Image: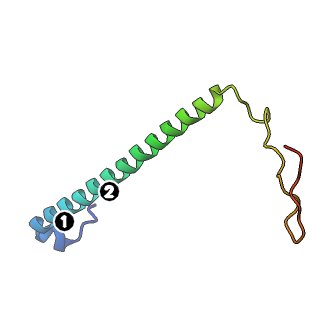
Amino acid sequence: MNATPDSTLANPEQLVADLQRQLGECRAERDALQRELDAASERQTATAEVLQVINSSPVRAGSWSLPPPRWGRAGVGVTPRTDPW
């Protein structure tokens, strides 16, 4: 049994035109999604490369630390610390 309305069968040229329009829309959507996928893949590759550089670095997380602040707590009457670190 065919679910196509009789009015569509009465005008096959309109049906073809509608299907061609839908096909064009689907192709445009496919192309847009492919561009998004390509961009995401490039970002993922770049991230992996950066992580590889970080991972191969001789300095590991936790093997160094920042010096303490040279100033005491913020506020009125704060004096600078005199120790070098």
- State which quadrant residue 42 falls in: top left
Q: Where is residue 50 in the image (x, y as percent from the top left)?
A: 56, 36
Residue at figure coordinates x 30%, y 51% from the top left: 31
The 10 Å Cα crowd at callout 2, few under 14, some 14 to 19, many 20 or more, is: few
Q: Name the residue under label 2.
A: 29
- State which quadrant residue 53 falls in: top right
Amino acid type, mark 1:
Asp
**Label 2 secondary element:** helix
Residue at figure coordinates x 86%, y 57% from the top left: 80
Left of 80 or right of it: where is 56? left
Q: Which of 14 and 1 is in front in this view?
A: 14
Q: In which quarter of the image is the N terminus?
A: bottom left
* Distance from the alpha carbon under mark 2 to that under mark 1: 17 Å
In this rendering, the answer to whether 83 lies above or below 12 is above
Q: Nearer the viewer, residue 25 or 18?
A: 25
Q: Which residue lies furthest to the bottom in this view?
A: 7
Amino acid type, mark 2:
Glu
Q: Nearer the viewer, residue 71 or 35?
A: 71
Q: Position of residue 3 (x, y in %)?
A: 28, 65
Q: Where is residue 82 in the image (x, y as percent from the top left)?
A: 89, 50
Dot placed on the residue nearer the N-terminal end, 2 or 1: 1
Label tally: 2
Q: Which of 18 and 46 is in front in this view?
A: 46
- Label of residue 18 in the image: 1
The 10 Å Cα crowd at callout 1, few under 14, some 14 to 19, many 20 or more, is: few
Left of 36 or right of it: where is 10? left
In this rendering, the answer to whether 48 lies above or below 77 is above
